[in-house]
Image (tube, grey):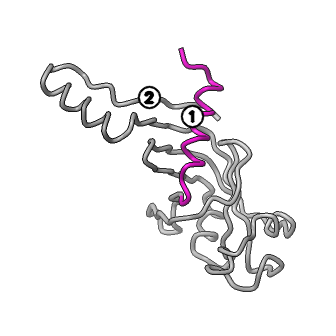
């Protein structure tokens, strides 16, 4: 039986294996909007950090409705994390998260008040740990030939 700690470790491994996450939030007009974001830090899957510019529709929408979903997808599986986001003006945190790639997307540097950190606190994470493309293909064929359910890896939802 898989323990809660094992599930959290699996979620963390899948998240770390993905450079770019997709952040989904509710726009001011009520539509779901998804945008790619580089995860800058996470201590555990329950808290992750991003950098963004303050004067954006995304920030205004999150300040009005903090509910978000963050997805990670890679060769070994995916994670869909539901939680809430807050905008942080903490200059020390922005500086900690800042690197050369941030200069590519944002101007002014970490000391510029126009740049903020976005903290996402996860509540739950659904994950699927894939057995890999080759194994998945074999399992699909096996399922078709034997009329049995293929073993496509571990899937579960875990409280964070």
- Residue 15 or 50: which is nearer the viewer? 15
Helix, strand or loop at mark 1: helix
Q: Does residue 58 appear left or right of residue 78 in this picture?
A: right
Check disc 1 and report the residue beneath it.
10
Q: Quadrant of residue 95?
A: bottom right
Q: Residues within 10 Å of mark 1 (few under 14, many from 20)?
A: some
Q: Residue 6 location, x and y as percent?
A: 61, 26
**Which numbered disc flags the more N-terminal residue, 2 or 1?**
1
The residue lying at 51 percent from left, 60 percent from top is 26
Whether tag 2 and tag 1 are in contact, CB under 8 A, the answer is yes
Q: Which residues are magenta?
A: 1-20
Q: Does residue 142 appear left or right of residue 117 in this picture?
A: left
Helix, strand or loop at mark 2: strand
- Furthest residue toward left: 145
Above/below status of 123 relative to 146: below
- Furthest residue toward top: 1
Q: Quadrant of residue 98?
A: bottom right
């Amino acid at each position: 039986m898989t323990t809660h700690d094992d599930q959290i470790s699996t979620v963390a491994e899948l998240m770390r294996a993905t450079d770019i996450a997709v952040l989904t939030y509710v726009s001011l007009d009520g539509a779901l909007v998804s945008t790619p974001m580089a995860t800058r830090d996470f201590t555990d899957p329950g808290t992750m950090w991003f950098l963004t510019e303050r004067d954006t529709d995304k920030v205004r929408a999150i300040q009005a409705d903090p509910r978000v979903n963050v997805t990670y997808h890679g060769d070994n599986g995916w994670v869909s994390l539901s939680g809430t986001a807050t905008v942080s003006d903490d200059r020390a945190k922005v500086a900690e998260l800042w690197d050369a790639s941030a200069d590519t997307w944002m101007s002014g540097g970490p000391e510029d008040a126009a740049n903020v950190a976005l903290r996402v606190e996860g509540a739950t994470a659904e994950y699927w740990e894939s057995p890999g493309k080759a194994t998945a293909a074999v399992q699909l064929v096996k399922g078709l030939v034997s009329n049995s359910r293929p073993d496509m890896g571990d899937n579960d939802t875990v409280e964070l």
